[in-house]
Image (cartoon, grey):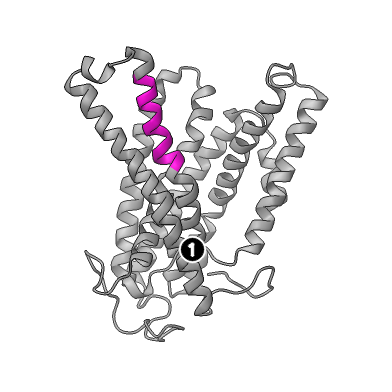
Amino acid sequence: MAVISWVCSLPRTFDTLSKLATFSAFFTFISVLLAAIFAGIEAHPYGYNTGGKTGTLVGEPTVLAVPAKGTTFVSGMNAFLNISYTFIGQITIPSFIAEMKNPKDFPKALWAVTICEVIVFGLCGSVVYAYTGTQYNTAPAFGSLGNEVYKKVSFSFMIPTLIFLGVLYASVSARFVFFRIFEGTRHKGSHTVIGWASWAGILAVLWIVAFIVAEVIPFFSDLLSLMSSLFDSFFGFIFWGTAYIRMRQADYGPGWISRRGIRGLSGFLLNVIIILIGLYMLSAGTYATVQSIIDNYRDNQFGSAFTCLSNGL
């Protein structure tokens, strides 16, 4: 998988990746649609009435509109961070805008993608939850399917997306390093041996690090929460709130809040709230994630690093 992803990451522009993204979006839609359908037609979710390691996998699926009584801050915060991770991809936005023929069209694309994303994942996630309940729902949700054939079929359509997402984030991360090293040189935008060799080497290092991380960390849900609290808090909230304030100050000068009237004040307050949400995710979210990891290790919910023991669905 790492070798395939490295090869797919080699193109230095998003022109080729944009074509892969189209197929990725299609396969993702099919995958989550199948998961929702299979969850509805199968008799019972995975682990039905088995008790499980914690003894909570009993009874019919329990569907709740509000957290159950006794839900801890740690579990509630981790659920929020998992959901946040799904919808926050703002770290890639500057790279996308930089390669658009008309960067001013980006807001239209962002609105279209976000609306489709909320509708598809919101509906499919709700359907799967309705049939698997609180006690049988897993992360990723494919693990909640009790029928092994249903599980494998629906998850197989997600494999191209998993590869593409890895390729996308590897490409964006490599750009940050590559542009920093070769800023102001001909290697940045020309086909040179040094440029291509450096690009391939940077990607190779990133994929090796990714492989090590994947093998060292034997859990999924808490890993998503950790990445969300450490990185999405900044790139999804703090960065953009700060950017808005700095951009308005640059456009309108000192005193821009009073000069723009109610628009200036409301925009300032809204973005201060966004920054505070990011800081809360960074502090309280990181604490909740670390505590969840400690609790799960204590309860023997995870395996060990570099183990041959399967931690698949």
Q: Residue at x 65, y 75 (%)?
A: 309
253 with respect to 193 (left or right): left
Q: Where does residue 235 sit, x and y in percent of width and height?
A: 46, 39
Task: From the image, tell me which residue sits under label 1.
Answer: 290
Does any portion of residue 148 appear in the rendered image? no
Label 1: which secondary element: helix
Give the left or right position of residue 213, taking residue 22 as reference. right
Q: Report x, y in % for residue 1.
A: 67, 54
Q: Left or right? Give the position of 180 relative to 233.
A: right
> Quick one: 209 or 9, which is closer to the camera?
209
Residue 141 lies left or right of residue 10; in this view the side is: left
Q: Is residue 278 visible?
A: yes
Which of the 4 image quadrants contains residue 237? top left
Q: Residue at x 68, y 21 (%)?
A: 183
Query: Hey, which residue is sitting farthest front in the picture?
Result: 254
The answer to which quarter of the image holds residue 312 is: bottom right
Label the magenta part by its dominant secondary structure.
helix
Residue type, label 1? Val
Q: Is residue 239 magenta?
A: yes
**Residue 65 percent across, percent down from the top left:** 21, 64
Numbered range of the magenta stretch: 234-248
Based on the picture, tell me whether residue 157 belongs to the magenta stretch: no
Q: Position of residue 305 (x, y in %)?
A: 66, 69
